[in-house]
Image (cartoon, rainbow, N blue to C red):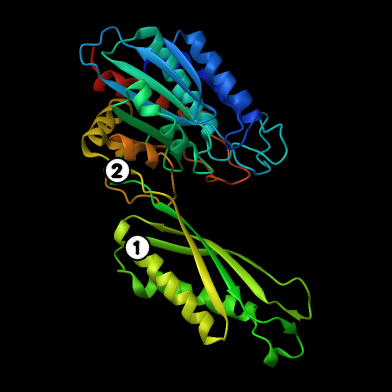
Amino acid sequence: MPIINRIAALHEEVTAWRRDFHRHPELGFDLPRTASVVADKLRAFGCDDVVTGIGRSGVVGIIRGRSDRSGRVIGLRSDMDALPIHETSGAAHASTVPGRMHACGHDGHMAMLLGAGQYLAETRNFDGTVALIFQPDEEGGHGARAMVADGLMERFGVQEVYGMHNSQDPVGSIQVITGAASAAVDWIDIRIEGKGGHAAKPHIAVDTLLVAAQTVIAVQSIASRSIDPLAAVVVSLCSVETGAANNVIPHAAVLKGTVRTLSRAVQDQVEARLNAVVSGTAAAYGATATVAYERACPSVLNTAAESAAAALAAASVVGEPGVWRDVPPPMGGEDFAFMLEERPGCMVGIGQGGEFGLHHPSYDFNDEILPIGMSYWARLVETRMPA
């Protein structure tokens, strides 16, 4: 693979940065150490400006090219936060904070963007300006929206924005999808009200646990019987909260879950059917039910020109066979979507292989792909804004 020589020389150093981030995970917006380390490195690289506190705890580093005839400004984004998971990887660089770990690869995302930033600050072989964006609270789904609301795009004049996330695809592959590249994420909270009573006298109670069980089954008919089989949709109920005693029929039950869709039309259809199915099922058993439906995060929508630019940069690093274009989008969510609602751009997936997938307690980022990701970022800047 044509890894940039200077970036190859940085591999060992960037690996050390990545493992340091991994040892010291922080959550959500509460990233004092992580944001400070990122900002200090950006200053040490010689960034023209480093701004902290964007969207509460985000960091932006500005690097200007050798010239600025085009006036173009592109943003490159990495997430920073970890997950509330207890690590079981057994790695020498495992988390030192019980109950927290980088189980999604954000430590690697930061390291790759920092490594690319160091290279770009040294060479400045481009025409225009790069904004290195380090975002909090991707896992909570609020960080990108917070940075956008804090004037990220306007303040730094960002015209295009690009993201990257690791995947279990083979090492040496970069996934570039034009159009929908992730699912919209919606949250479901269903509250069922019945009539509690003694377990020995179920006939004078309205058993909400029974209604909850029937609701779980009925809700599965939405994807299988109400939506076009060719349309992508996931409806998952993942939590049941009710009852605490062996001999008491509970008066209430709460179901929680998620809906994932790739189109607004299907999203609207699922929400409407969910309300009908839940209320109808409850009524059939003499109970009542309400649905709280939150549209938490839209789908990542990669724009055509920017996806073509990303694919060109990816091919220059991993070769044309390594660029995966015609693949179905994953049904996971990604709050980079909020940035793409403001500016055109593209999020790519970088393959890292591995036995354990994202959010697994034994997951660890594959340091082998650090030079691939850094070279992709550098080539994207240099080909999108040629000197």
Indicate the quadrant where residue 67 lies. Answer: top left
- Does the rendering let one see residue 147? yes
Quadrant holding the N terminus: top left
How many C-alpha atoms fall within 10 Å of the one at disc 2: few (<14), some, or many (≥20)? many
Q: Position of residue 14 (x, y in %)?
A: 52, 19
- Residue drawn at point x = 27 percent, y = 43 percent: 325
What amino acid does circle 2 point to?
Ile
- In the image, residue 268 above or below residue 276: above
Indicate the quadrant where residue 244 lies. Answer: bottom right
Task: Give the secondary structure at mark 1.
Answer: helix
Indicate the quadrant where residue 77 lies. Answer: top left
Along the line of sight, the residue nearer the viewer: 142 or 371: 142
What amino acid does circle 1 point to?
Asp
- Number of the label disc, if any, that sits on residue 268: 1
Looking at the image, tell me whether mark 2 or mark 1 is earlier in sequence order.
Answer: 2
Quadrant holding the C terminus: top left
Q: In the figure, is residue 96 to the left or right of 369?
A: right
- Number of the label disc, if any, that sits on residue 177: 2
- Residue drawn at point x = 64 percent, y = 85 percent: 206
- Does the rendering let one see residue 171? no
Q: Position of residue 144 (x, y in %)?
A: 45, 36
How many C-alpha atoms fall within 10 Å of the one at disc 1: few (<14), some, or many (≥20)? few
- In the image, residue 275 above or below residue 232: below
- Number of the label disc, if any, that sits on residue 62: none
- Residue drawn at point x = 53 percent, y = 61 percent: 257
